[in-house]
Image (spheres, grey):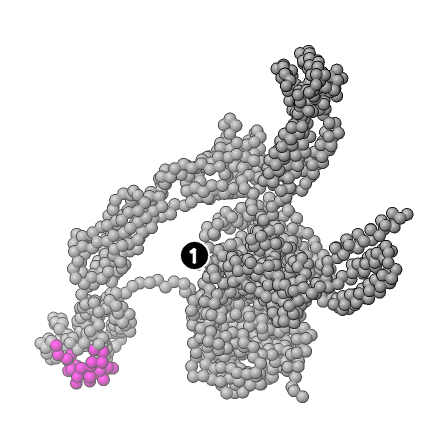
């Protein structure tokens, strides 16, 4: 029906009244049994019409209380007297509360509901798409265990992979275990519950780490799988021009050799004497083959104008340039660097900086920053000290990038035994600055979902399918946006196959990371809370009459009329 | 009033009634019981035991009540009616005969008597009819139909399963045996020294102290021809038959994985694990003294100390090793003795001992080092634990200010005092040149050497402070050019050195200084020498004085022995407190003196790999790659590697995972995902070496990002 139910009801009632009155007057004129028959026939017609288009009654609106998994006993106690009240599956509700399969079936049972009051952890994924016209109130259960977890889903081999998150009481410690179950890193959470852990990545492929949230007495509050897909690196080529060799360069060169970077360098030693290895020329043809170039401020001072011009042109064409600052920048070098967008300002002395909070070191280590700061528009910081000062940053210049590095002794990380962290830092800036390479478009990995819940995979090509841990092949139906939905029935590593590539992604078991699950539901339900609608709806809502009694009444009347006819035969 | 019935008749009639009642009740029960039972079974399957029990109870009660109520139907009236209906001889007057009402007229009395007599006669002849109601055939058919329907429903009703676990099945490892169920008893006898009792377990996995003897008693279900235990390293323990039981024995030295083999075929998929709990060495805690280094300056008579030792099974012998070092520098004498502190016993003990320092000849300048060694009672070889060493040091005299300032005090003389050797060389050269030189020139050169020797002596003398005086006696027969000065020298100790010698050669300004005053510029150096060094230095200076004497007298051959002795003393002073350390690790290539400083670059090779390749262990990496590619890993290489790296945590778990992978039929196919393969891969993770952080180039920005970047960098129009 295109008209509103209330309008329909009014029309129907008016028509029925008119017809009834006119027929009654006509029959009254005639009188006799036939009048009764005619009246009954009219009534049957009206009932049939009401059966097809049931009139609406205005009933007072009701708030349906829905108990969701995660409701605390205190909350249950508070709502024990409210009616109507339903409980979703897995909610710890007393026996007297009615159980429904989901919110949709609850709304069918209580059609006069205009507002929902959700008690507990939040609506599960299947119920989160609610009718926006319903008012929603949410009485959230306090969060417990691991509530936030952030870790890169993809990482390169050998670096220190960071895992951060937040714990809620009773969990106070976080422990990261490698795929074999041995503890790699453990830390106590801060006052706000935030923690920062890291682990070195030892081999290429999918790996599943485990994060355990521990209470103060050491018992396990919950454990969560943290999956990561580790990729191998690529071979880059670089040139370094330095004023003098120093330990920073020594350890960086060691890392570059181990990471597969082809390095040519020229380091000055004295007047007319330099240390050279490989091809360190800065002519245009060589620069087109390089991925990035590292230059000192002292080496810049001895560059020829041709080399400087070649460098500038190469950066515009896509080369990465890292300007290392080891000391006060001479004015002519500073003038040259202004063309790149770096405004240097010399300081009196090198500064001592601490990096433990930013890089997640567990011991306090002191580093030295060069006595020159850099300012400029458009810089993205690469490394910041604990006090917020920028130690390294980059900016785009044409197709390439220019960056600066102010930290004098990041090699102390290697001396302290954190060579993985040092390598990760070096790889981070090399990767940020290097020349861009075309890569095949990768599908988007979903955020780890849970078993029996819908996950969405995007960025798919044709003929996409998923291989479950059991070996079953499941084809995916792709929408026009390139996304497909998938309902995993098992936990573990599922493999997404698009064309020739296989991409593993992890699905969590239902007991895995319950705190994260609850936090997700909590956030989704909180986002849907809208109390303001309640005022618009008013205290009543139209309720259609149930059809079954109308049908029975109509059937009885028609049957009686039929019987009368038959009897008179 | 009519006469009562005769006893026989009454009994007979009552019997008729009773039989009918029983028949009725039994019919009722027969009809109702079977469906009720069937319904109860259906309820058991549908709702559970309580509902079924309640239903049965209610049904039985209802049947009983129904039976009782129907039995009440069979009363005297019914009897009379039935007798009338069945026996025509009773002329429909049985009710009258049974005297329900008193007869009013004489005819009725007559009839009553007549029928009664007939009744009695029939009862006496046992000809009363059988009044029991017939079994209703239709009723039974209906009852049977209902019962069968209920039975069918009960049989095929889907069983209600209580699902309280989440949708996936728990993948717990199957406990105990696999295909063939074997009853097994393990008797574990721990070693005698542990004092533990023998334990019996009924599973194949066990934990026992290392060195225990494990005895198996297997009871296989079926008769087998041979049985053996196969261990993870390949060794076999064949079992011997003893009646229906198979027995075997094994000495558990280290943790092991094993599997039972019956008739050559293994019975389980999973390896069973025997954990050997190692015997830990004792733990020693020192109660007294608290510090490891105790310094005393006053004589000490006794030194007492107390140690607490604890062991997991029992302590053995304890021994105190006392080392006394006497002397200093290179002349250190070390004596060592061991004092037994008693035999063992118990799991924790406190050892107390008081050392008598006088009996040990502990004197000033000595060090006493004491260490406790406690063994536990492990039988083949006890584990010995050593405590920390406790040092008692009695500081020698004059060293009190240097104890804490070892870096500041200069105990050795600087190395530039080597010109004494040069003087010797020059003296020998001069002596060799003597035949070629003129007499005057020879004497002049010798004198110059003497001046050098004097300057050296004065330089050394400055280290002793200006208080030095050459108190050496003259050699007999030494008539020198400075003979006039020497008696003055001999007479006046404590004065400045002779100033009468001709001032030639170098060192003139120094002599002026000595002539007119004292040089105090290195006075502080003088007081830093210890007395022993001073004494030797004085001797050296005496020798130098003698040498100078003879050199000045143009007698180098006489001066030479004195020079040698002076050098000897100087070397003693230099080397007195020196510690010799071998220089290691630096093997420089030999210098090619012919090419040195010539500037030739021919033949120089570029030492390309300037950086040697990082040494990595390829075994585990190769196994990881094989697993990732889906190939079978090299299990033998893995076992070898684990054996060579005993520091691995839980190598048996890795071996068990490798074995599981080998036996898993799913994993034979390369492309099929396999839980055992990923489990072994996971176990290999901590064994892999950490590679250097790899680097990836950044991706080319897509169309939207490129347009954005272009817009940002385009100069504003």
Main SS, magenta region, reads: loop
- Location of residue A218 in the rendering, given as x and y in whole percent from the top left corner: 44, 56
Q: Is residue B272 above or below residue A361?
A: above
Residue furthest left in the image: B491
Instruction: Give the structural element (helix, strand or loop) at label 1.
Output: loop
Give the vertical position of B305 relative to A415 (above or below). above
Closer to the camera in the image, A73 or B98:
B98
| Residue depicted at x 60% and y 84% | A309
- Residue A324 sits inside the magenta stretch: no
Q: Which residue is farthest front? A: B105
In the rendered image, which quarter contains the N terminus of chain A?
A: bottom right
Residue at the spot 42% in from the left edge and 45% down from the top edge: B277
Which of the pair A485/B116 is nearer the observer?
B116
Residue B67 in view here = no
User: Residue farthest to the right?
Assistant: A569
Residue A343 position in % (x across, y down): 53, 85
Closest to the observer: A114 or B375? A114
- Find residue A336 and report its image quarter: bottom right
Let me know if residue A410 appears in the view. yes
Q: Quadrant of residue B549?
A: bottom left
Residue A373: where, in percent of width, then height? 49, 82
- Judge from the rendering whether residue B360 lies leftward or rightward of residue B20; answer left or right: left
Residue picked out by circle 1: A217
Q: Position of residue A365 (x, y in %)?
A: 43, 70
Crowd rating for badge 1 (residues with CA inside 10 Å; few <14, some 14–19, many 20+): few
The correct choice, above or below, for B245 with respect to A284 in the image is above
Magenta highlight range: B494-523
- Residue at image position (17%, 58%) is B300
Residue B511 is a magenta residue: yes
Q: Quadrant of residue A136?
A: bottom right
Q: Please, which chain is the residue tagged with disc 1 on?
A: A
* Side of A534 where A499 appears, left or right: right
């Amino acid at each position: 029906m295109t008209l509103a139910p209330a309008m329909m009801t009014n029309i129907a009632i008016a028509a029925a009244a008119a017809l009834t009155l006119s027929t009654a007057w006509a029959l009254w004129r005639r009188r006799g049994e036939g009048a009764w028959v005619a009246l009954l026939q009219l009534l049957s017609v009206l009932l049939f019409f009401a059966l097809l288009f049931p009139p609406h009654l205005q009933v007072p609106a009701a708030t349906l209380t829905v108990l969701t998994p995660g409701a605390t006993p205190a909350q249950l106690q508070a709502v024990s007297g409210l009616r109507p009240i339903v409980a979703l599956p897995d909610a710890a509700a007393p026996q007297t509360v009615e159980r429904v399969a989901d919110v949709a079936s609850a709304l069918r049972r209580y059609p006069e509901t205009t507002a929902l009051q959700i008690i507990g952890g939040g609506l599960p994924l299947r119920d989160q798409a609610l009718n926006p016209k319903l008012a929603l109130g949410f009485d959230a259960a306090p969060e417990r265990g691991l509530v936030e977890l952030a870790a890169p889903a993809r990482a390169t081999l050998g670096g220190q992979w960071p895992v951060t998150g937040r714990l809620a009481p009773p969990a106070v410690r976080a422990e990261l275990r490698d795929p074999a179950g041995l503890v790699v890193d453990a830390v106590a959470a801060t006052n706000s519950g935030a923690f920062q852990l890291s682990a070195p990545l030892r081999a290429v492929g999918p790996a599943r780490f485990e994060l355990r949230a521990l209470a103060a007495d050491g018992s396990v509050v919950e454990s969560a799988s943290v999956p990561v897909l580790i990729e191998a690196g690529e071979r880059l080529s670089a040139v370094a021009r330095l004023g003098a060799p120093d330990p920073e360069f020594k350890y960086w060169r060691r890392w570059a050799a181990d990471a597969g970077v082809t390095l040519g360098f020229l380091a000055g030693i004295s007047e007319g004497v330099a240390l050279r290895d490989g091809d360190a020329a800065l002519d245009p043809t060589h620069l087109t083959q390089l991925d990035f170039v590292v230059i000192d401020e002292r080496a810049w001072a001895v560059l020829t104008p041709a080399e400087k011009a070649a460098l500038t042109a190469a950066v515009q064409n896509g080369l990465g340039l890292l300007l290392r600052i080891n000391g006060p920048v001479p004015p002519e070098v500073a003038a040259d660097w202004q063309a790149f967008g770096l405004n240097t300002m010399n300081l009196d002395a090198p500064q001592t900086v601490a990096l433990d909070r930013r890089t997640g070191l567990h011991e306090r280590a002191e580093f030295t920053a060069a006595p020159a700061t850099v300012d400029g528009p458009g810089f993205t910081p690469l490394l910041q000290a604990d006090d917020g000062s920028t130690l390294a940053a980059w900016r785009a210049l044409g197709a390439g990038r220019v960056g600066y590095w102010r930290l004098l002794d990041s090699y102390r990380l290697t001396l302290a035994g954190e060579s993985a962290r040092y390598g990760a830092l070096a790889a981070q800036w090399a990767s940020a600055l290097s020349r861009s390479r075309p890569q095949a478009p990768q599908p988007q990995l979903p955020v780890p979902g849970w078993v029996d819940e819908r996950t969405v995979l995007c960025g798919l090509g044709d003929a996409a399918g998923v291989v479950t841990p059991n070996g079953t092949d499941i084809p995916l139906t792709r929408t026009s946006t390139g996304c497909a939905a998938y309902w995993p029935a098992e936990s573990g590593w599922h493999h997404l196959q698009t064309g020739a590539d296989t991409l593993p992604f992890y699905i969590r078991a239902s007991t895995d990371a319950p705190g994260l699950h609850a936090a997700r539901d909590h956030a989704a339900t909180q986002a849907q809370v809208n109390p303001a609608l309640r005022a618009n709806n008013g205290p009543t809502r139209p309720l259609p009459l149930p059809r079954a009694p109308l049908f029975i009444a109509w059937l009885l009347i028609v049957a009686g009329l039929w019987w009368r006819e038959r009897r008179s035969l | 009033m009519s006469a009562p019935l005769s006893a026989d008749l009454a009994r007979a009639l009552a019997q008729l009634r009773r039989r009918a009642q029983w028949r009725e009740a039994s019919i009722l029960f027969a009809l109702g019981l079977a469906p009720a039972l069937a319904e109860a079974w259906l309820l058991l399957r549908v709702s559970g035991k309580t509902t079924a029990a309640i239903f049965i109870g209610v049904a039985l009660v209802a049947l009983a009540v129904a039976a009782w109520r129907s039995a009440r139907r069979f009363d005297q009236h019914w009897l009379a009616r039935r007798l009338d209906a069945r026996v025509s001889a009773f002329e429909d007057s049985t009710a009258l005969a049974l005297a329900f009402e008193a007869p009013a007229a004489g005819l009725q009395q007559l009839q009553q008597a007549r029928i009664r007599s007939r009744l009695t006669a029939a009862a006496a002849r046992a000809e009363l009819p059988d009044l029991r109601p017939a079994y209703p055939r239709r009723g039974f058919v209906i009852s049977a139909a209902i019962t069968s329907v209920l039975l069918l429903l009960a049989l095929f009703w889907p069983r209600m399963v209580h699902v309280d676990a989440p949708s996936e099945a728990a993948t717990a490892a199957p406990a105990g045996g696999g295909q063939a169920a074997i009853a097994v008893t393990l008797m574990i006898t721990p070693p005698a020294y542990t004092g533990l009792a023998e334990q019996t377990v009924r599973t194949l996995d066990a934990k026992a102290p290392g060195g225990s003897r494990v005895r198996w008693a297997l009871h296989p279900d079926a008769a087998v021809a041979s049985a053996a235990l196969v261990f993870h390293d390949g060794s076999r323990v064949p079992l011997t038959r003893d009646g229906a039981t198979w027995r075997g024995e094994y000495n558990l030295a280290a943790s092991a994985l094993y599997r039972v083999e019956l008739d050559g075929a293994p019975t389980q998929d999973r390896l069973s694990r025997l954990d050997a709990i190692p015997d830990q060495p004792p733990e020693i805690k020192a109660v007294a003294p608290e510090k490891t280094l105790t310094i005393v300056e006053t004589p000490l008579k006794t030194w007492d100390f107390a140690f607490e030792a604890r062991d997991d099974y029992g302590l053995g012998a304890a021994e105190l090793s006392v080392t006394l070092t006497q002397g200093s520098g290179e002349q250190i004498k070390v004596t060592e003795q061991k004092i037994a502190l008693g035999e063992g016993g118990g799991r924790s003990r406190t050892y107390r001992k008081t050392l008598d320092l006088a009996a040990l000849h502990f004197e000033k300048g000595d060090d006493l080092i004491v260490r406790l060694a406690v063994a536990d009672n492990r039988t083949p070889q006890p584990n010995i634990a050593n405590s920390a060493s406790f040092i008692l040091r009695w500081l020698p005299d004059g060293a009190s200010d240097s104890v804490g300032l070892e870096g500041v005090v200069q105990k050795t003389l600087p190395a530039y005092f080597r010109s004494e050797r040069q003087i010797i060389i020059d003296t020998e050269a001069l002596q060799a040149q003597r035949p070629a030189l003129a007499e005057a020139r020879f004497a002049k050169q010798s004198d110059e050497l003497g001046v050098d020797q004097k300057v050296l002596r004065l330089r050394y003398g400055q280290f002793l402070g200006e208080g030095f005086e050459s108190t050496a006696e003259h050699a007999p027969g030494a008539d020198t050019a400075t003979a006039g000065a020497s008696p003055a020298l001999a007479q006046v100790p404590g004065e400045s050195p002779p100033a009468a010698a001709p001032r030639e050669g170098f060192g003139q300004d120094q002599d002026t200084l000595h002539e007119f005053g004292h040089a105090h510029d290195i006075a502080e150096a003088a007081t830093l020498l210890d007395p022993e060094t001073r004494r030797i230095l004085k001797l050296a200076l005496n020798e130098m004085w003698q040498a100078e004497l003879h050199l000045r007298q143009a007698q180098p051959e006489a001066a030479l022995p004195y020079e040698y002795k002076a050098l000897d003393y100087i070397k003693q002073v230099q080397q007195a407190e020196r510690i010799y350390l071998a220089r290691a690790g630096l093997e420089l290539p030999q210098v090619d003196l012919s090419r040195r400083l010539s500037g030739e670059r021919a033949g120089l090779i570029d030492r390309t790999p300037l950086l040697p390749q990082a040494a990595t262990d390829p075994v585990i990496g190769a196994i990881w790659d094989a697993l990732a590619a889906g190939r079978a890993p090299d299990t033998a290489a893995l076992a070898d590697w684990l054996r060579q790296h005993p520091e691995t945590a839980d190598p048996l778990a890795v071996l068990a995972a490798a074995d599981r992978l080998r036996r898993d039929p799913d994993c034979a196919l390369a492309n099929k995902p396999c839980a055992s393969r990923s489990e072994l891969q996971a176990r290999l993770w901590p064994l892999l070496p950490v590679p250097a952080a790899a680097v990836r180039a950044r991706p080319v920005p897509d169309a939207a990002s490129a347009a954005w970047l272009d817009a940002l960098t385009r100069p504003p129009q």
